Image (cartoon, rainbow, N blue to C red):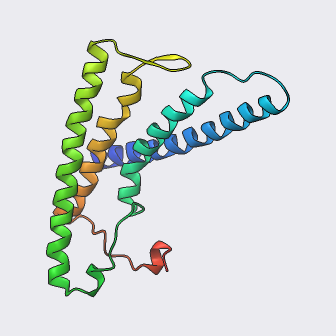
């Protein structure tokens, strides 16, 4: 069982690293594109389309890791003034809603991938790309998001254990 947890953590961290690499590549592509325009060359036509894909992939790949490290956006301004028992119940409700929502989106995204794959759909922009490549990270990453919220739900961790100052807030 320990090896499963280590493998899961390695995949989660690997997705976060890949997200970082992708965002860096998009930065490089944009700089090269703009520089080429400034010096009078014609930049590659695919830059904008690929950067748009990278933005979706980056967001999806980073999402589970952000939930794990409590780096996603959540508001605890109301719950911080509640009694501990009430806060715990509300937290469990929030975790359940987030787990169910991520699971529903995961199933829907998997359907999008399958339809795009089966129908050989193409995303037509400056370059033609198979549409499934746009949707591909969505079901995988949303499954990991659901797992991360389920971890909170079953009590492995708690989103509200850190103080605001420890998260870098005011």
Looking at the picture, does residue 122 appear above or below residue 39? Answer: above
Q: Residue at x 72, y 38 (%)?
A: 31
Relative side of 64 to 83, left or right: right
The foreground one among 82 and 36 is 36
Relative side of 124 to 144, left or right: right
Looking at the picture, does residue 74 appear above or below residue 170? Answer: above
Q: Residue at x 78, y 29 (%)?
A: 36
Residue sitting at the far right: 39
Residue 121, position as x, y percentages in the image: 35, 15
Residue 9, position as x, y percentages in the image: 37, 49
Quadrant position of residue 156: bottom left
Question: How many numbered marks, from 0 up?
Answer: 0
Relative side of 163 to 4, left or right: right
Asked whether residue 1 is in view, the answer is no
Residue 133, position as x, y percentages in the image: 41, 24
Q: Residue at x 30, y 19 (%)?
A: 116
Asked whether residue 23 is in view, the answer is yes
The foreground one among 87 and 120 is 120
Q: Residue at x 60, y 22 (%)?
A: 46
Residue 65, position as x, y percentages in the image: 40, 52
């Amino acid at each position: 069982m320990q090896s499963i947890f280590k493998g899961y953590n390695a995949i989660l961290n690997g997705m976060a690293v890949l997200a970082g690499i992708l965002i860096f590549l998009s930065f490089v592509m944009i700089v090269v594109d703009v520089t080429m325009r400034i010096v009078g060359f014609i930049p590659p036509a695919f830059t904008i389309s690929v950067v748009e894909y990278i933005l979706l992939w980056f967001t999806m790949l980073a999402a589970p890791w952000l939930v794990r490290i409590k780096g996603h956006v959540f508001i605890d301004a109301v719950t911080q003034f509640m009694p501990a028992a009430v806060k715990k119940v509300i937290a469990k409700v929030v975790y359940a809603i987030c787990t169910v929502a991520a699971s529903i989106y995961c199933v829907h995204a998997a359907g999008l991938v399958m339809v795009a794959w089966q129908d050989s759909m193409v995303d037509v922009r400056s370059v033609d790309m198979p549409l499934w490549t746009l949707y591909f990270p969505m079901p995988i990453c949303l499954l990991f998001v659901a797992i991360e919220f389920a971890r909170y739900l079953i009590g492995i961790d708690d989103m509200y254990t850190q103080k605001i100052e420890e998260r870098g807030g005011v």
